[in-house]
Image (cartoon, grey):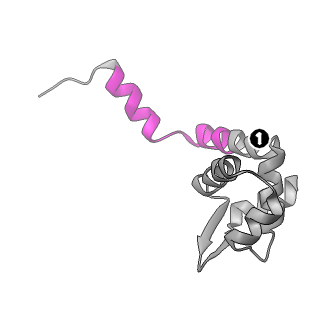
Amino acid sequence: MQEEDELDAYMATEKDPSEGGSVKMDHVIMEKVAISPDRRKLLRIVGVFGKNEEELRDKSGLNDFKYKYHMDFLLKVGFLKFEEGVYRLTDSGIAVHDSVC
């Protein structure tokens, strides 16, 4: 039987953060959205009715790199979802939208 070393123990704790750690991470993510004018703009444009990609790109005025960078972030953290050809706010996206936009 192999013993668990310090690195294995640390990695095991990182996979399943404590409730406090999870709340802290949520706050860090919300701060990253709140301090970015481009991310706030994208959330505001999507709004409660959603937007297709063409409308979102046109209205945002962001270049391709910035658009993809910020959209990937918002999708990854779960503030936006893409369904049936339309970007929509998730429940957590609506909460952030209401507080920072």
Examine the image and state in which quarter residue 88 appears: bottom right
Task: Name the quarter where the N terminus is drawn.
Answer: top left
Residue 34 in picture, x, y percent from top left: 81, 45
Task: Name the quarter where the C terminus is drawn.
Answer: bottom right
Task: Indicate whether residue 45 is drawn in magenta.
Answer: no
Camera-side residue of 42 and 78: 42
User: What predominant SS class does the magenta segment belong to?
Assistant: helix
In the shown orientation, is residue 6 left or right of residue 61? left
The part of the chain drawn in magenta is 7-26
| Label 1 residue SS | helix
Camera-side residue of 16 and 38: 38
Examine the image and state in which quarter residue 49 appears: bottom right
In the shown orientation, is residue 83 left or right of residue 47? left
Task: Report the label total.
Answer: 1
Task: Indicate whether residue 18 is drawn in magenta.
Answer: yes
Examine the image and state in which quarter residue 19 appears: top right
Residue matched to label 1: 31
Residue 82 in picture, x, y percent from top left: 60, 70
Camera-side residue of 63 and 33: 63
